[in-house]
Image (cartoon, rainbow, N blue to C red):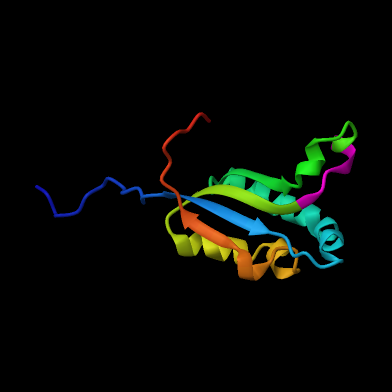
């Protein structure tokens, strides 16, 4: 006899998001980035392990890859992420707590978080 309840757990629908986080352009922005980079990377690794961050990396200037010594002179100018989460608010909360956001590395006025309709996925 059924009591009207189900034993099956329902899995929450997860959406894909893209996050574009350009750095501030003031003179001290790059030094601020370097000073909190380890904390940022550790937190990103935790969120990757939890399944929220699927892809992440620093945006570079074109000059960073055009010279023979480019690998030694990478100029980071922002960050990009692909995430999976239950809601836009979940992703927004995650990134507004990030040390790059709270310490003034990312330009808070230019942070973009958008749902993404994935057409091709080769990962």
Q: Residue at x 70, y 48 (%)?
A: 59
- Report the magenta residues as a range: 71-76
Q: Nearer the viewer, residue 110 or 51?
A: 110
Residue 41: x, y in percent? 73, 50
**Residue 62 location, quadrant:** top right
Question: Horizontal placement of 103 versus 118: left or right?
Answer: right
Q: Residue at x 83, y 63 (%)?
A: 32
Question: Horizontal placement of 98 versus 123: left or right?
Answer: right
Magenta stretch encompasses residue 13: no
Residue 95: x, y in percent? 61, 61
The residue lying furthest to the top in this view is: 122
The residue lying furthest to the left in this view is: 1
Q: Nearer the viewer, residue 54 or 81?
A: 81
- What number of labels is visible? 0
Q: Residue at x 14, y 54 (%)?
A: 3
Q: Residue at x 53, y 30 (%)?
A: 123
Q: Nearer the viewer, residue 96 or 1?
A: 96
Residue 9: x, y in percent? 31, 48
Question: Horizontal placement of 23 versus 50: left or right?
Answer: right
Question: Horizontal placement of 5 versus 23: left or right?
Answer: left
Residue 47: x, y in percent? 60, 50
Vertical placement of 17 versus 112: above or below? Answer: above
């Amino acid at each position: 006899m059924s009591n009207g309840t189900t034993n099956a757990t329902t899995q929450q629908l997860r959406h894909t998001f893209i996050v574009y986080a350009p750095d501030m352009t003031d003179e001290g922005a790059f030094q601020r980035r370097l000073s909190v980079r380890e904390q940022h990377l550790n937190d990103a690794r935790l969120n990757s392990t939890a399944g929220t961050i699927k892809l992440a990396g620093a945006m570079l200037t074109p000059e960073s890859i055009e010279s023979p010594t480019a690998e030694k002179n990478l100029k980071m100018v922002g960050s990009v992420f692909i995430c999976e989460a239950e809601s836009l608010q979940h992703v927004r909360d995650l990134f507004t707590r990030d040390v790059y956001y709270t310490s003034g590395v990312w330009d808070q006025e230019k942070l973009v978080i958008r749902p993404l309709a994935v057409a091709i996925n080769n990962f």
